[in-house]
Amino acid sequence: MRRRPTTMTRLLAIAALGLPFVLPGAPAVATPTTPTRQLGEVIPAPVETRPDARGTFTLGRHTVIRTSPGSGAAWRVGRQLAETLRPATGYPLPVLPVRATPLPEIALLLGGADARVSQEGYQLDVTRRGVTIRANTAAGLFAGTQTLRQLLPAEIEASQRQRVTWSVPGGRIVDYPRFAYRGAMLDLARHFHTVDEITAYLDLLSQYKINYLHLHLSDDQGWRIQIDSWPRLTTVGGGPGTGVDGVGPGYLTKADYKAVVAYAAARHITIVPEIDMPGHTNAAQSTYAELNCDGVAPAPRTDIAVGYSSLCIDDELTYRFVEDVIRELAAITPGPFLHIGGDEAHATTDEEYRTFMTRVLPLVAKYGKRAYGWNEVMQVDPPTDVVAQFWGTGTTNADLAEAAARGNKVVMSPANKAYLDMKYDRNTRLGLSWAAYIEVRDAYDWDPATRVANVGEQSILGVEAPLWSETLRSLDDIEYMAFPRLPAIAELGWSTAASHDWESFRTRLGEQAPRWRLQQVDFYPSPQVPWI
Ligand code: TNX
């Protein structure tokens, strides 16, 4: 099984490969190996692009990266950009927190951008003298650098640098997101994915301006996060034999989880942890007999059935357990959301479900977090700060529409559009097909704000692409299902509805292929896309 290297091991590998040998005095070959991008030919599509043919900037040996003086946050974005560009270009690209230089520069500046860029957007100007990215926050600067990376030749990740002209097309981009929440989800419960695999996925997500990664940390088959007050959850529930087909073990220690949170934060991505309840709890209940109404622990489960397990709704111990878990998880989660699942609780009655949620939702608030749940949570008319994640395949949902009318926000993950674990077509070797086959165009051609009747633009917090891992083992498997559909969902979350255009999208998607090959992303070569 191939493991895609992390940023650090990749840098070391490129260094070890050495540089292609060039004869002294040989003329520099200045033919780009891929055509230079047009300004705006990136994913997600920018809001406003004004090309200026006179402005092409060529990055060279003397280029410096200049950041707002006095801002450590801007300097850190500059350093990350330098670390990305140095191995490919071979240029020193020093990062200088100074006011202005006479040198060609990539300037990352806080303030002075078009007012529309708000908290996460940026303005990018390319002239012959340099590139200037202006934003109000480090997140905005970081988003601008992701656009800049895509405007540079794909060889940016390679070691064949002598053959590349590092040009950026001239003009101005003003860009900012349509929705505040642009998410992906990874299921660690059905198959555990290691810290290295999660951070490799974070690297890929950050290139497409995804800003939330939801981790599904517990389910019937496994429990994947250390909880000190219930230690056997991980040693047994995440131990040998756990997961679909019993291929475990694996879990995140609190130190692992904090490392993932920090790695994500450095890429302006917030982790959203999920503990699924009151159903999807067999791993906990087979570990702790006292969590069952009859006090008898059920057998561990390694199949993919759903809807059979439930915490004991009328037992006080259940709420001690839930509060312990929420308290410990909230304490290591800096982000605002804590996801409590709530889906497919078919082993509880509607009344029990209401009783459970009415007690548990306030516990999330008690530990300072905003409760988030699958759309079933809206059945209990929760407070308006509770967020619903829509995973249905239909276009009507009365509970969701009523919640939206009351003011609850919704994240759109329709299973027949946004689920990355659905097969592309009947021949896909991985994945499930209960919701649909989802080709790239299906994943792209829908609008989050018109998907469900009476759940309109003002009610949409954003979109999320969940990746359930019943059939996935490795990072290659994750990549194969996520690429190229993840960039489609990322574009739905960021770009304007007015810019939605399949022909444009599939062309820009095809242009990502050289980049993915160099990054060793094992993508599905959809016949719908003109890959270059
Ligand atoms: C439904 S979607 C589930 C998950 C499965 C998934 C597989 C949802 C909230 N529940 O438990 O893993 O389908 O596609």
Image (spheres, grey):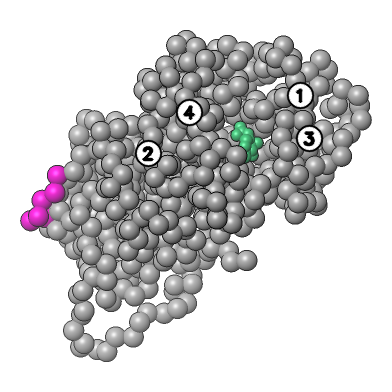
| Three-letter code for the amino acid on which mark 1 is drawn | Ala
Residue at (47, 41) in percent of width and height = 269
2 or 1: tag closer to the N-terminus: 1
The quadrant of the picture occupied by the N terminus is bottom right
Q: Disc 4 or 3, which lies upstream in sequence? A: 3
From the viewer's perspective, is 288 left or right of 137?
Answer: right
Residue topped by disc 1: 347
Residue 158: percent from left, percent from top: 38, 69
State the extent of the magenta-drawn residues as a range: 50-55
Q: Which residue is mark 2?
A: 445
- The span from disc 2 to disc 1 (Cα, nearest Å) is 35 Å
Q: Residue at x 27, y 59 (%)?
A: 152
Which residue position is annotated with label 4? 411
Q: Left or right: where does residue 281 sit relative to residue 358?
A: right
Mark earlier in primary sequence (1, 3) = 3
**From where the camera sits, is residue 471 visible?**
yes
Q: Which amino acid type corresponds to the residue marked 2 in the rendered image?
A: Asp
Callout 1: 10 Å neighbours few (<14), some, many (20+)?
A: some
Residue 113's spot in the image, x, y percent?
Answer: 21, 37
